[in-house]
Image (tube, helix red, strand yellow):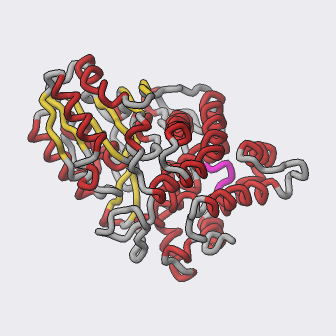
Amino acid sequence: MTFETAFTMETSSIKFGLGVTKEIGYDMKSFGATRVMVVTDPNLSENIAVQVTMESLKEMGIDAVLFDQSRVEPTDLSFNEAIRFAQEGKFDGYVGVGGGSSMDTAKVANLYATYPADLLAYVNPPVGEGRLVPGPVKPMLAVPTTSGTGSETTGVAIFDYLEMNAKTGIAHRALRPLMGIVDPVNTRSMPKMVAACTALDQVAHALESITALPFNQRPAPEHPGARPAYQGANPISTIWAERSLKMLTQNIVQVMEDPDNDEARGNVMLAATFAGIGFGNAGVHLAHGMSYPVSGMCETYFPEGYPDDHPTVPHGMSVIMQAPAVFRFTAPSNPELHLHCAEIMGADISEGNPNNAGEILANVIIDLMKRTGMPNGLKAVGYSEADVDKLVAGTLPQHRVTKLSPRPASAEDLEQLFLDSMTLW
Ligand SMILES: [Fe+2]
């Protein structure tokens, strides 16, 4: 096998600052759009971020049409609804305002309105065909209203494929927004649990992208166009992820305790954007791969601060619950690197050695979970040992991410990791 020898660093432009949403009309106009679909979810349609976006676009003479039916945790059905709206609307620009789901829905609406195809055409294999996006899509801007999913900087869109009861997605650099408008004003009304889950998702992005299989240990692509967006750990991604990890762990708890602290909230938001840049080019691995069935198969859990129309384990929560077991498992691949991550998160590593590196990192993650009000493992969100087989079966198709694990995980390994994630402390 020939190994990869190159990596690329691609990201969206970022505009950051208190109140920058009001400049979106100027930005959209500079990209040449005249008729724009603004995607958000029903809970946010009256939100200040949506209102300011619509006003700013209209002030610049842009015909802005609101689509407020994106689903928190999108499905193939909700994506198809947005695609139909986009195809009928003949738009030449898109804006996603909200959490990752609204931004992801805008990306997908843009893709399929520009290059119509069956939904599975561009979806990652093995669920979809993994067809390459034929060319550029229409300009899209992203306005996050949570502490960031990083979605504003990535070409990834995630959804629940209902038939298979699992999360999958579309990943292509053409889907990346042209600009992320990161405005701390837009997160002032964010519920505490949403703040915690989105920030812990970023912690996982940072940890997974730093510890992912290095880019030069991945097989070389057959041609440059086949180089994946998730390339593996690389020196530039790691810089962003390390800085982000530090800012997140220093600011999350402050945001939980005082949601009016604009500076701490701004730091978490900025850190989330950093993590997005790092993870968007490097990738994530087991904690994310295992989280998709945890979210997708949830039947009974209704977290506070989230819409109560369907049970869900929010993305960040479903990811972080696997993280302690995952990093205990991956630590032998590079104990120094795992200790380094623990130190960035504030752990004392003076007694660290190759045997306890995973435990030290797991403990500092668990400590952060406790301080941010996370449930104590999978049992606390309705799963039991009897669900492990189907959770493993739902993880195995997530090759795109799990193959970036620095230590290969067999079905038996995954089984043990889920068992270890049932109760964390
Ligand atoms: Fe994530």
Q: Is residue 290 above or below residue 277?
A: below
Q: Residue at x 35, y 59 (%)?
A: 160
Q: Nearer the viewer, residue 40 or 318?
A: 40
Residue 108 drawn at (x, y percent): 28, 43
Where is residue 344, by image quadrant? top right
Q: Nearer the viewer, residue 220 or 193?
A: 193
Question: Would you identify the image quadrant in which residue 135 lies?
Answer: top left
Residue 376 on the magenta span: no
At which x and y percent is residue 265? 51, 42
Main SS category, magenta section:
loop
Residue 332 to residue 209: above or below:
below
Pick the front one: 410 or 110: 110
Which residue range is magenta in the image?
405-409
**Residue furthest left as drawn:** 88
- Residue at (60, 44) in percent of width and height: 251
The residue lying at 35 percent from left, 37 percent from top is: 143
How many numbered tags mark residues here? 0
Left or right relative to 366: residue 20: left
Looking at the image, which residue is at 74% across and 60% down? Answer: 363
